[in-house]
Image (cartoon, helix red, strand yellow):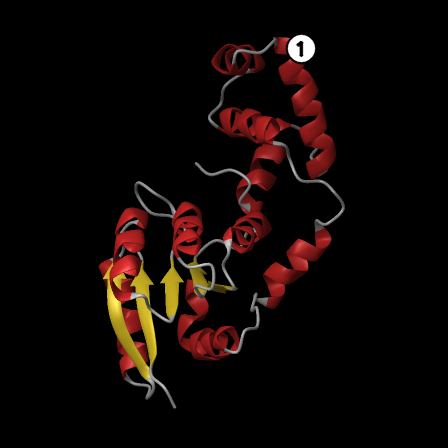
């Protein structure tokens, strides 16, 4: 069997070392590169051209989604598996849209990483069942627009409608209309509930 050449991307060195230890114990794998930021990931990908990239989403500077997009521009056939602590369905949807073929929670690395890699190397997609279930529950066109996401993100910081309107250069009534739409799409009872749902689903981050 050919060796699967792997690159790991995560801003936590201990996690990169842990993944390397798991792969080193398995025949058929070789860790050929690592990176701590999205920018480093893109540069290292150009250098080593791995068969598979294990990509974190939350990193300083360029995040994982942008790095996935950049890598796929270099090589449209690049295989990328996202490793993340976030269970939100929107994070998974963004990663897949960017070009990732798989999505794995870091808590499941030791249990499911090798099986997930095998699926991806066979040209298949792999998403944890609980996240796939969440995605299925939100396919009814309830995705927030870019502006609504901006409004919700600012609401999450505690900003009131007037402050949000000033920051975004829109009218306060427009902000109220956006909030009404957000409540409806997220099935939220109020602003606090909407923010909580947005954080849980990965629509916004703090």
Q: Is residue 179 left or right of residue 78?
A: right
Is residue 78 placed above or below 21 in the rendered structure?
A: above
- Residue closest to the eye, 57 or 46: 46
In the rendered image, residue 22, in percent from the top left (x then y), is placed at 31, 78
Tell me the crowding category of disc 1: few under 14, some 14 to 19, or many 20 or more residues within 10 angstroms, Cα based. Answer: few
- Residue closest to the eye, 175 or 190: 175
Is residue 193 placed above or below 118 in the rendered structure?
A: above
The residue shown at (31%, 79%) is 23
Can residue 11 be seen here? The reply is: no
The residue shown at (38%, 55%) is 74
Q: Which quarter of the figure has residue 187? A: top right
Q: Is residue 202 left or right of residue 129?
A: left
- Residue closest to the eye, 202 or 141: 141
Q: Is residue 34 left or right of residue 205?
A: left
Q: Quadrant of the C terminus?
A: top left
Element under disc 1 = helix
Q: Quadrant of the N terminus?
A: bottom left
Can residue 142 be seen here? The reply is: yes
Total label count? 1
Q: Is residue 163 left or right of residue 64?
A: right
In the rendered image, residue 95, in percent from the top left (x then y), is placed at 51, 53
Is residue 123 placed above or below 139 in the rendered structure?
A: below
Q: Which quarter of the figure has residue 35? A: bottom left
What residue occupies the far right of the structure in this picture?
Answer: 140
In the rendered image, residue 19, in percent from the top left (x then y), is placed at 31, 71
Residue that carries the numbered disc 1 in the rendered image: 173
The residue shown at (38%, 64%) is 54
Is residue 50 placed above or below 134 in the rendered structure?
A: below
In the rendered image, residue 193, in percent from the top left (x then y), is placed at 62, 35
């Amino acid at each position: 069997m050919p060796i699967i050449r792997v690159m790991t991307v995560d801003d936590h060195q201990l996690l990169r070392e842990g993944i390397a230890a798991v792969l080193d114990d398995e025949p058929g794998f070789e860790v050929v590169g690592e990176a701590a930021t999205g920018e480093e990931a893109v540069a290292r990908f150009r250098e080593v051209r791995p068969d598979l990239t294990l990509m974190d989403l939350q990193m300083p500077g360029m995040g994982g989604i942008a790095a996935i997009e950049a890598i796929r521009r270099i090589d449209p056939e690049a295989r990328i598996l996202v490793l993340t602590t976030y269970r939100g369905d929107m994070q998974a949807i963004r990663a897949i849209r960017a070009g990732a073929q798989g999505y794995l929670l870091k808590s499941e690395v030791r249990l499911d990483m090798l099986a997930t890699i095998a699926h991806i190397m066979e040209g298949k997609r792999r998403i944890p069942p609980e996240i796939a279930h969440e995605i299925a529950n939100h396919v009814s066109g309830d995705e927030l627009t870019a502006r609504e996401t901006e409004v919700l993100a600012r609401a999450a910081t505690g900003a009131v409608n007037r402050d949000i309107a000033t920051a975004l250069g829109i009218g306060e009534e427009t902000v109220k209309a956006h909030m009404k739409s957000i409540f409806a799409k997220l099935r939220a009872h109020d602003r606090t509930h909407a923010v909580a749902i947005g954080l849980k689903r990965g629509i916004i981050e703090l």
